[in-house]
Image (cartoon, rainbow, N blue to C red):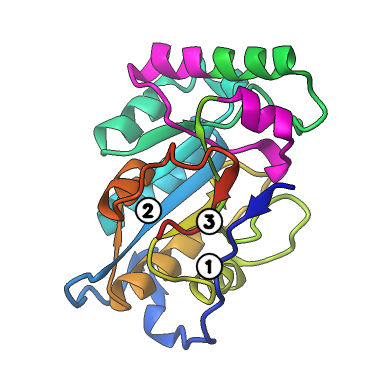
Amino acid sequence: MNKILLCASAGLIVLASCATNGGSAMSTDYPEPDKICALTFDDGPDSVKTGKVLDKLEAHNVVATFFVVGQNINDGTKAVMERAKTMGCEFGNHSWNYSSMDKLTADQITDYISRTSAAIEKYTGTTPAFFRPPNLATSQTMFDTIPYTFASGVLGYDWAGMNTGAKKRAENVINAMQNGAIILLHDVQPDPHPTPEALDIIIPELKRQGYEFVTLSELFARQGVDPAANQDRMWVVVE
């Protein structure tokens, strides 16, 4: 039976201090960080929507890990991927398309994963180290076949069909945070998609709470955890 490491929910917090003005955080007076977390985004790249997320990351001076879909990686999205790489962001494998993989054979899984990794390497010159299954659906065949560490995360519930505004998406993340948490959001979803605006709440509030934002690779390294130590696990919190 596959086990997902569940993160404990923190108490409800007050978000008034995170009010935004014109898309920029009002407060930049933050304590020295004593906790770390990793922002991650699924379902891109997209030349416009991923760019909106990168604008927010740049404005708040943080990095993230993008779990990209192989069929979306092409000459049209090359520039936005290069921008993310230049900003210090990294890329993970999110399969070739959006379909769940838990019913696929080992050969089908290998095809989807290898084509996506090849596209990432072609357009960024980097090799992914992490995998996020589409729709978070897993099978033992996937764990046995995919050579990357599986990552889930603290959910913002910002995908299609979830009628949540920016404030609610931010609350979903902030109220479930703890040191070492992976945050799971989406850069690409159908409009209206207020996740970029939610970052204007999430990032300043977590900085106020003493969090530093790092890539997923750095999160594991800083926590002293070998991501390959347990390949039958889908990580939510690295501790």
Q: How many marks?
A: 3
x 72%, y 28%: residue: 141
In this view, the residue in front, 77 or 2, is 2
Query: Quadrant of residue 138 in the image?
Result: top right
Q: Which residue is mark 3?
A: 236
Say what amino acid the circle numbered 1 marks.
Answer: Val
Q: Secondary structure at mark 1?
A: helix
Is 158 covered by the magenta stretch? no
Mark 2 nearby-residue class (10 Å; few <14, some 14–19, many ≥20): many
Residue 192 visible in image: no
x 47%, y 59%: residue: 237
Return the x and y of residue 98 as percentages of the image width and height. Answer: 71, 31
Camera-side mark, 1 or 3: 3
What range of the chain is rendered magenta? 117-146
- Which disc, if any, is residue 173? 1
CB contact under 8 Å: marks 2 and 1? no
